[in-house]
Image (spheres, rainbow, N blue to C red):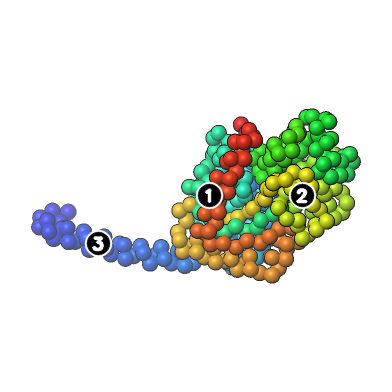
Amino acid sequence: MALRNTPRRTVLSTMATLTMASCALALPFAATANDNFPNKPITIVVPFSAGGTTDILARVIAQDLGKQLGQSVVVDNRAGAGGNIGGALAARAPADGYTLFMGTVGTHAINEALYKKMPFNPGKDFQPLSRVANVPNLLVANPNQPFRTVPELIAYAKAHPGQVNFGSSGSGSSIHLSGELFKMMAKVDMVHVPYKGSAPAVTDLLGNQIAIMFDNMPSAISHVRAGKLRPIAVTTPKRSPELPDVPTIAEAGVPGYEATSWFGLFTTAGTPKPVVDKLSAALAKSLAAPAVRSKIKEQGGEVVSETPEQFAAFIKTEADKWAKVVKASGATAD
Protein backbone atom coordinates (compact mmCIF):
# COMPACT_ATOMS: atom_id res chain seq x y z
CA MET A 1 0.00 0.00 0.00
CA ALA A 2 2.81 2.41 0.83
CA LEU A 3 4.39 1.77 -2.61
CA ARG A 4 1.33 3.02 -4.56
CA ASN A 5 2.70 6.52 -5.15
CA THR A 6 6.35 5.55 -5.27
CA PRO A 7 8.19 5.97 -8.63
CA ARG A 8 8.37 2.75 -10.71
CA ARG A 9 12.20 2.69 -10.64
CA THR A 10 12.17 2.81 -6.83
CA VAL A 11 9.59 0.00 -6.65
CA LEU A 12 11.64 -2.25 -8.94
CA SER A 13 14.80 -1.50 -6.98
CA THR A 14 13.06 -2.33 -3.71
CA MET A 15 11.67 -5.60 -5.11
CA ALA A 16 15.09 -6.60 -6.42
CA THR A 17 16.63 -5.91 -3.03
CA LEU A 18 13.98 -8.01 -1.27
CA THR A 19 14.45 -10.86 -3.76
CA MET A 20 18.21 -10.87 -3.26
CA ALA A 21 17.76 -10.82 0.48
CA SER A 22 15.37 -13.79 0.41
CA CYS A 23 17.79 -15.73 -1.80
CA ALA A 24 20.63 -14.92 0.57
CA LEU A 25 18.55 -16.36 3.42
CA ALA A 26 17.46 -19.45 1.45
CA LEU A 27 20.89 -20.46 0.17
CA PRO A 28 22.52 -20.87 3.60
CA PHE A 29 19.45 -22.82 4.75
CA ALA A 30 19.73 -25.24 1.79
CA ALA A 31 23.45 -25.60 2.30
CA THR A 32 22.92 -26.30 6.00
CA ALA A 33 20.28 -28.94 5.21
CA ASN A 34 22.70 -30.73 2.90
CA ASP A 35 25.58 -30.32 5.35
CA ASN A 36 23.53 -31.96 8.08
CA PHE A 37 22.70 -35.00 5.94
CA PRO A 38 21.91 -37.53 7.25
CA ASN A 39 20.08 -36.55 10.43
CA LYS A 40 17.64 -39.47 10.50
CA PRO A 41 17.65 -43.19 9.55
CA ILE A 42 18.11 -44.23 5.92
CA THR A 43 16.15 -47.02 4.24
CA ILE A 44 17.41 -49.41 1.57
CA VAL A 45 14.48 -50.78 -0.43
CA VAL A 46 15.19 -54.36 -1.55
CA PRO A 47 12.85 -55.44 -4.37
CA PHE A 48 13.05 -59.15 -3.51
CA SER A 49 12.24 -61.28 -0.49
CA ALA A 50 14.44 -61.71 2.57
CA GLY A 51 17.11 -64.39 2.30
CA GLY A 52 17.89 -63.94 -1.40
CA THR A 53 21.13 -62.53 -2.80
CA THR A 54 19.84 -58.96 -3.17
CA ASP A 55 18.75 -59.01 0.47
CA ILE A 56 22.00 -60.60 1.68
CA LEU A 57 24.15 -57.99 -0.05
CA ALA A 58 21.93 -55.11 1.07
CA ARG A 59 22.23 -56.15 4.71
CA VAL A 60 26.01 -56.50 4.47
CA ILE A 61 26.24 -52.99 3.02
CA ALA A 62 23.63 -51.48 5.38
CA GLN A 63 25.54 -52.46 8.50
CA ASP A 64 28.79 -50.75 7.48
CA LEU A 65 27.14 -47.85 5.62
CA GLY A 66 25.36 -46.92 8.83
CA LYS A 67 28.73 -46.64 10.57
CA GLN A 68 30.13 -44.47 7.78
CA LEU A 69 27.15 -42.09 7.81
CA GLY A 70 26.52 -42.04 11.56
CA GLN A 71 22.90 -43.12 11.17
CA SER A 72 21.08 -46.44 11.17
CA VAL A 73 20.43 -47.94 7.73
CA VAL A 74 17.47 -50.32 7.60
CA VAL A 75 16.42 -52.78 4.90
CA ASP A 76 12.83 -52.80 3.62
CA ASN A 77 11.89 -55.84 1.49
CA ARG A 78 9.22 -55.10 -1.14
CA ALA A 79 9.09 -58.16 -3.38
CA GLY A 80 7.11 -58.83 -6.53
CA ALA A 81 6.87 -58.29 -10.30
CA GLY A 82 10.54 -59.03 -10.96
CA GLY A 83 11.64 -56.18 -8.71
CA ASN A 84 9.21 -53.64 -10.16
CA ILE A 85 7.10 -53.24 -7.01
CA GLY A 86 10.08 -52.20 -4.90
CA GLY A 87 11.47 -50.17 -7.79
CA ALA A 88 8.26 -48.17 -8.15
CA LEU A 89 8.20 -47.49 -4.40
CA ALA A 90 11.79 -46.22 -4.36
CA ALA A 91 11.31 -44.18 -7.55
CA ARG A 92 8.43 -42.24 -5.92
CA ALA A 93 10.39 -41.52 -2.73
CA PRO A 94 11.40 -37.91 -1.91
CA ALA A 95 14.64 -36.91 -3.61
CA ASP A 96 16.47 -36.33 -0.33
CA GLY A 97 18.84 -39.30 -0.09
CA TYR A 98 16.98 -41.03 2.74
CA THR A 99 15.60 -43.76 0.47
CA LEU A 100 18.12 -45.95 -1.31
CA PHE A 101 17.40 -48.82 -3.69
CA MET A 102 19.36 -52.05 -4.15
CA GLY A 103 18.96 -52.46 -7.90
CA THR A 104 19.97 -55.43 -9.99
CA VAL A 105 20.66 -56.38 -13.57
CA GLY A 106 16.97 -57.30 -13.64
CA THR A 107 15.50 -54.02 -12.41
CA HIS A 108 17.85 -51.77 -14.39
CA ALA A 109 18.97 -53.71 -17.46
CA ILE A 110 16.35 -56.38 -18.23
CA ASN A 111 12.87 -55.37 -17.15
CA GLU A 112 12.42 -52.54 -19.66
CA ALA A 113 12.80 -55.08 -22.47
CA LEU A 114 10.72 -57.72 -20.72
CA TYR A 115 7.69 -55.72 -19.58
CA LYS A 116 5.43 -53.86 -22.00
CA LYS A 117 4.59 -51.33 -19.30
CA MET A 118 6.97 -50.33 -16.51
CA PRO A 119 5.85 -48.56 -13.30
CA PHE A 120 9.07 -46.53 -13.32
CA ASN A 121 11.82 -45.45 -15.71
CA PRO A 122 15.13 -47.08 -14.67
CA GLY A 123 17.21 -44.46 -16.45
CA LYS A 124 15.32 -41.33 -15.43
CA ASP A 125 13.86 -42.08 -11.99
CA PHE A 126 17.08 -43.15 -10.25
CA GLN A 127 20.45 -41.63 -9.45
CA PRO A 128 23.19 -44.32 -9.62
CA LEU A 129 25.65 -44.40 -6.73
CA SER A 130 27.84 -47.47 -7.38
CA ARG A 131 27.76 -51.07 -8.33
CA VAL A 132 28.27 -53.20 -5.23
CA ALA A 133 29.09 -56.66 -6.54
CA ASN A 134 29.19 -59.00 -9.49
CA VAL A 135 27.84 -62.44 -8.66
CA PRO A 136 27.97 -65.67 -10.67
CA ASN A 137 24.78 -67.63 -11.09
CA LEU A 138 25.07 -71.26 -10.10
CA LEU A 139 23.15 -74.00 -11.86
CA VAL A 140 22.00 -76.27 -9.04
CA ALA A 141 19.71 -79.28 -8.90
CA ASN A 142 17.86 -81.16 -6.22
CA PRO A 143 20.03 -84.22 -5.36
CA ASN A 144 17.11 -86.53 -6.24
CA GLN A 145 17.20 -85.46 -9.88
CA PRO A 146 18.74 -88.03 -12.27
CA PHE A 147 21.41 -85.73 -13.79
CA ARG A 148 24.76 -84.57 -12.42
CA THR A 149 26.37 -82.74 -15.34
CA VAL A 150 25.37 -80.28 -18.05
CA PRO A 151 25.41 -82.96 -20.80
CA GLU A 152 23.25 -85.24 -18.64
CA LEU A 153 20.79 -82.40 -17.97
CA ILE A 154 20.55 -81.58 -21.68
CA ALA A 155 20.02 -85.23 -22.59
CA TYR A 156 17.34 -85.65 -19.92
CA ALA A 157 15.54 -82.45 -20.92
CA LYS A 158 15.51 -83.50 -24.58
CA ALA A 159 14.16 -86.93 -23.63
CA HIS A 160 11.49 -85.32 -21.40
CA PRO A 161 10.47 -82.07 -23.13
CA GLY A 162 8.49 -79.70 -20.93
CA GLN A 163 9.03 -81.83 -17.82
CA VAL A 164 12.10 -80.14 -16.35
CA ASN A 165 11.07 -77.03 -14.45
CA PHE A 166 13.43 -74.31 -13.28
CA GLY A 167 12.66 -71.75 -10.59
CA SER A 168 13.64 -68.10 -10.44
CA SER A 169 13.35 -65.07 -8.19
CA GLY A 170 10.81 -63.61 -10.60
CA SER A 171 10.14 -63.02 -14.26
CA GLY A 172 12.83 -60.84 -15.75
CA SER A 173 15.43 -61.51 -13.07
CA SER A 174 18.92 -62.56 -14.11
CA ILE A 175 18.08 -65.99 -12.69
CA HIS A 176 15.13 -66.26 -15.06
CA LEU A 177 17.05 -65.08 -18.14
CA SER A 178 20.02 -67.31 -17.31
CA GLY A 179 17.58 -70.21 -17.73
CA GLU A 180 16.06 -68.75 -20.89
CA LEU A 181 19.54 -68.30 -22.37
CA PHE A 182 20.38 -71.91 -21.49
CA LYS A 183 17.16 -73.14 -23.12
CA MET A 184 17.95 -71.19 -26.27
CA MET A 185 21.61 -72.20 -26.58
CA ALA A 186 21.17 -75.84 -25.50
CA LYS A 187 17.99 -76.19 -27.56
CA VAL A 188 15.93 -77.74 -24.76
CA ASP A 189 12.31 -77.29 -23.65
CA MET A 190 12.13 -76.45 -19.93
CA VAL A 191 9.35 -74.76 -17.92
CA HIS A 192 9.99 -71.52 -16.02
CA VAL A 193 8.42 -71.23 -12.54
CA PRO A 194 8.69 -67.66 -11.14
CA TYR A 195 8.67 -66.87 -7.41
CA LYS A 196 8.60 -63.64 -5.39
CA GLY A 197 12.29 -63.83 -4.62
CA SER A 198 15.09 -66.35 -4.58
CA ALA A 199 14.48 -67.68 -1.04
CA PRO A 200 11.02 -69.23 -1.68
CA ALA A 201 12.31 -70.72 -4.94
CA VAL A 202 15.24 -72.33 -3.14
CA THR A 203 12.82 -73.70 -0.53
CA ASP A 204 10.86 -75.49 -3.25
CA LEU A 205 14.09 -76.65 -4.88
CA LEU A 206 15.19 -78.19 -1.58
CA GLY A 207 11.80 -79.92 -1.40
CA ASN A 208 12.15 -81.20 -4.99
CA GLN A 209 9.08 -79.21 -6.09
CA ILE A 210 11.25 -77.81 -8.89
CA ALA A 211 14.16 -79.62 -10.51
CA ILE A 212 16.82 -76.99 -11.07
CA MET A 213 17.62 -73.33 -10.60
CA PHE A 214 20.15 -70.87 -12.02
CA ASP A 215 20.45 -69.19 -8.63
CA ASN A 216 22.71 -66.34 -7.54
CA MET A 217 25.61 -68.00 -5.76
CA PRO A 218 25.18 -66.23 -2.37
CA SER A 219 21.74 -67.72 -1.79
CA ALA A 220 22.71 -71.22 -2.99
CA ILE A 221 26.27 -71.76 -1.83
CA SER A 222 25.46 -72.63 1.80
CA HIS A 223 23.07 -75.37 0.64
CA VAL A 224 25.72 -76.68 -1.75
CA ARG A 225 28.31 -76.80 1.03
CA ALA A 226 25.81 -78.62 3.25
CA GLY A 227 25.15 -81.20 0.52
CA LYS A 228 21.48 -80.22 0.20
CA LEU A 229 21.82 -79.01 -3.40
CA ARG A 230 23.89 -80.47 -6.24
CA PRO A 231 26.12 -77.96 -8.06
CA ILE A 232 26.21 -78.58 -11.81
CA ALA A 233 27.92 -75.52 -13.31
CA VAL A 234 28.51 -71.76 -12.96
CA THR A 235 27.24 -69.26 -15.52
CA THR A 236 30.36 -67.09 -15.70
CA PRO A 237 33.24 -67.45 -18.23
CA LYS A 238 35.62 -68.54 -15.44
CA ARG A 239 35.16 -70.92 -12.51
CA SER A 240 34.39 -69.42 -9.12
CA PRO A 241 37.25 -69.41 -6.56
CA GLU A 242 34.66 -70.42 -3.95
CA LEU A 243 33.73 -73.59 -5.90
CA PRO A 244 36.81 -74.35 -8.00
CA ASP A 245 35.74 -77.92 -8.81
CA VAL A 246 32.47 -76.80 -10.43
CA PRO A 247 32.85 -76.25 -14.20
CA THR A 248 31.41 -73.37 -16.21
CA ILE A 249 28.39 -74.06 -18.41
CA ALA A 250 30.50 -73.07 -21.42
CA GLU A 251 33.24 -75.60 -20.73
CA ALA A 252 30.72 -78.27 -19.71
CA GLY A 253 28.90 -78.42 -23.02
CA VAL A 254 27.35 -75.08 -24.08
CA PRO A 255 30.17 -73.05 -25.71
CA GLY A 256 29.79 -69.28 -25.49
CA TYR A 257 27.29 -69.34 -22.63
CA GLU A 258 27.75 -66.45 -20.15
CA ALA A 259 25.44 -64.74 -17.66
CA THR A 260 26.55 -62.65 -14.69
CA SER A 261 24.36 -60.98 -12.09
CA TRP A 262 25.25 -57.58 -10.69
CA PHE A 263 23.87 -55.49 -7.86
CA GLY A 264 24.17 -51.76 -7.20
CA LEU A 265 22.92 -48.97 -4.99
CA PHE A 266 20.78 -46.06 -6.20
CA THR A 267 18.94 -43.11 -4.74
CA THR A 268 16.03 -41.15 -6.18
CA ALA A 269 16.71 -38.93 -9.21
CA GLY A 270 16.90 -35.26 -8.33
CA THR A 271 18.67 -35.81 -5.04
CA PRO A 272 20.97 -32.80 -4.39
CA LYS A 273 24.55 -33.35 -5.54
CA PRO A 274 26.09 -32.73 -2.09
CA VAL A 275 23.90 -35.55 -0.73
CA VAL A 276 24.77 -37.83 -3.66
CA ASP A 277 28.45 -37.09 -3.09
CA LYS A 278 28.18 -37.96 0.62
CA LEU A 279 26.36 -41.21 -0.12
CA SER A 280 28.81 -42.15 -2.87
CA ALA A 281 31.86 -41.44 -0.67
CA ALA A 282 30.41 -43.38 2.26
CA LEU A 283 29.56 -46.33 0.02
CA ALA A 284 33.09 -46.36 -1.41
CA LYS A 285 34.49 -46.56 2.14
CA SER A 286 32.12 -49.42 2.97
CA LEU A 287 33.11 -51.36 -0.14
CA ALA A 288 36.78 -50.89 0.79
CA ALA A 289 36.25 -52.18 4.35
CA PRO A 290 37.95 -55.59 4.83
CA ALA A 291 34.96 -57.03 6.72
CA VAL A 292 32.53 -56.08 3.95
CA ARG A 293 34.79 -57.42 1.21
CA SER A 294 35.29 -60.66 3.13
CA LYS A 295 31.55 -61.19 3.62
CA ILE A 296 30.77 -60.58 -0.06
CA LYS A 297 33.60 -62.89 -1.12
CA GLU A 298 32.35 -65.62 1.23
CA GLN A 299 29.05 -65.48 -0.66
CA GLY A 300 30.82 -66.01 -3.99
CA GLY A 301 30.61 -62.37 -5.01
CA GLU A 302 33.19 -59.98 -6.44
CA VAL A 303 33.23 -56.48 -4.91
CA VAL A 304 32.91 -53.61 -7.39
CA SER A 305 33.25 -49.92 -6.47
CA GLU A 306 32.56 -47.17 -9.03
CA THR A 307 31.74 -43.51 -9.35
CA PRO A 308 28.11 -42.64 -10.15
CA GLU A 309 29.18 -41.75 -13.70
CA GLN A 310 30.95 -45.08 -14.23
CA PHE A 311 27.96 -46.99 -12.89
CA ALA A 312 25.57 -45.10 -15.18
CA ALA A 313 27.69 -45.92 -18.25
CA PHE A 314 27.88 -49.59 -17.25
CA ILE A 315 24.09 -49.80 -16.87
CA LYS A 316 23.55 -48.47 -20.40
CA THR A 317 25.86 -51.14 -21.85
CA GLU A 318 24.09 -53.88 -19.87
CA ALA A 319 20.62 -52.68 -20.92
CA ASP A 320 21.62 -52.86 -24.59
CA LYS A 321 23.05 -56.37 -24.13
CA TRP A 322 20.09 -57.88 -22.30
CA ALA A 323 17.50 -56.29 -24.58
CA LYS A 324 18.97 -58.42 -27.38
CA VAL A 325 18.82 -61.57 -25.22
CA VAL A 326 15.17 -60.93 -24.29
CA LYS A 327 14.24 -60.38 -27.92
CA ALA A 328 16.09 -63.48 -29.14
CA SER A 329 14.63 -65.70 -26.41
CA GLY A 330 11.08 -64.45 -26.82
CA ALA A 331 10.84 -64.10 -23.04
CA THR A 332 8.02 -61.93 -21.70
CA ALA A 333 6.59 -61.09 -18.31
CA ASP A 334 3.19 -59.86 -19.52
Task: Report the front residue among 101 and 25.
Answer: 101
Judging from the image, what secondary structure is the residue with disc 1 in? Answer: helix
Q: Which residue is mark 3?
A: 18
Q: Residues within 10 Å of mark 3 (few under 14, many from 20)?
A: few
Residue 308: % across, % down: 52, 59
Q: Residues within 10 Å of mark 1 (few under 14, many from 20)?
A: few
**Location of residue 61 by image quarter:** bottom right
Question: Is there CB contact under 8 Å for labels 1 and 3?
Answer: no
Q: CA distance from mark 2 to mark 3?
A: 73 Å
**Circle nearer the N terminus (2, 3):** 3
325 relative to 278, above or below = above
Q: Amino acid at mark 2?
A: Glu
**Circle nearer the N terminus (1, 3):** 3
Residue drawn at point x = 28 percent, y = 64 percent: 21
Judging from the image, what secondary structure is the residue with disc 3 in? Answer: helix
Taking the image as drawn, is residue 6 in sight?
no
Q: Which residue is mark 2?
A: 251
Q: Which residue is mark 1?
A: 316
Taking the image as drawn, is residue 301 in sight?
yes
Judging from the image, what secondary structure is the residue with disc 2 in? Answer: loop
188 relative to 241, above or below = above
